[in-house]
Image (tube, rainbow, N blue to C red):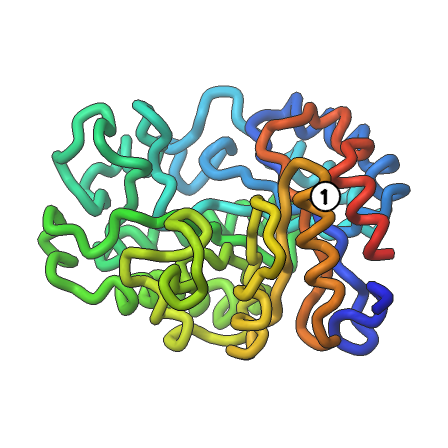
Amino acid sequence: MAAAEIGRAGQPVWRGVHLLVRDDAQITTLQEQLPRLAATGVNSLILEVNYNFEFRSHPELNRPGGIKPAHARAFAAAAHRLGIRVIPELNCLGHQSWETTTMALLAKHPEFDETPGQFPDNAGIYCRSWCPQHPGVNRVVFALIDELVEAFAADAFHVGLDEVFLIASEHCPRCRGGDPARLFARAVNDLHRHIVGERKLEMLMWGDRLLDAQALGGGEWEYAQNGTARAVDLIPKDIVICDWHYEQQTAYPSVPFLLGKGFRVWPASWQPLANARAFSAFARAQPRGNIVGFLCTVWGKVEIADVAGWPPVADVLAEWK
């Protein structure tokens, strides 16, 4: 099946790259690479900014040297001239720490933590989460989202939501004893209400917490083993699910599963090239419909200046032209 046949009639195939960006220097380098990326066929960029931005609404969360709004606007204008859609990302709920570092939101607002006062130096956990039921967290997070949307002139926003392991924690006075699926769905629905309902934007998220490991036969990273998977039936179906798989498999049952639930799906690969090609081939073989295209993630394995020529990007996205 030709890639052009995949997706909704009249809609372009999304040939995307996901990148972490942390400062103006990286934004400048990426802007210089936009013509090469466009020539490769890239028409969508997900920029995971997180707290690496000069926020006006909550300057206490700024990282020194973070991306300036003016540079973000210049980058977005250059990308749009080349037909490249820019989708900013703030990783929500989970991934609020990495190793011994707690990210800005919980470092400055520890009252939002799902496990307040627990796990000094983040020992014994993967990543911290914020509490989806804290009455103050959405006010802060929505303001950050709005600033990133404005700066990157975006018509869509990626909310992350991958690898959430700390949820319904016994250490949370609001969430202990709660249903992980309903708590996860609450976070998704709150974000959807703001991004789609109020801002009239498209919303994207990673799909791993919606996939039941036992039913679909996967491990705890790409599939959920902590009770969140039932949220798949509790969230709006207009969310684009970025379904990531990095290991080579003979089949990827999450793709037909999510399509069957009524979602649009953006399959996402990483490295090595053989693994990315295997997932791409499986996705292209699915019946036409709600597969929007293909997404290549980088995760720092190649310098921004070299992304356009990196085989897991250049070779695989060529299959979707």
Density class for disc 1 (Cα within 10 Å; few <14, some 14-19, many ≥20) is many
Closest to the observer, 279 or 244: 279
- Res 34 quadrant in image: top right
Q: Position of residue 161 (x, y in %)?
A: 42, 52
Q: Quadrant of the C terminus?
A: bottom right
Amino acid type, mark 1: Ala
| Residue at the extreme front of the image, as rendered | 250
Q: Which residue is mark 1?
A: 76
Relative to 138, 52 lies left or right:
right
Q: Is residue 290 visible?
A: yes
- Res 31 quadrant in image: top right
Q: Residue at x 77, y 32 (%)?
A: 310
Q: Position of residue 182 (x, y in %)?
A: 27, 69
Q: Position of residue 246 (x, y in %)?
A: 57, 45
Q: Position of residue 108 (x, y in %)?
A: 27, 32
Relative to 247, 212 lies left or right:
left
Can you say whether 20 is above or below 23 in the image?
A: below
- Res 4 quadrant in image: bottom right
Q: Residue at x 75, y 63 (%)?
A: 284
Can you say whether 98 is above or below 82 in the image?
A: above
Q: Is residue 190 visible?
A: no
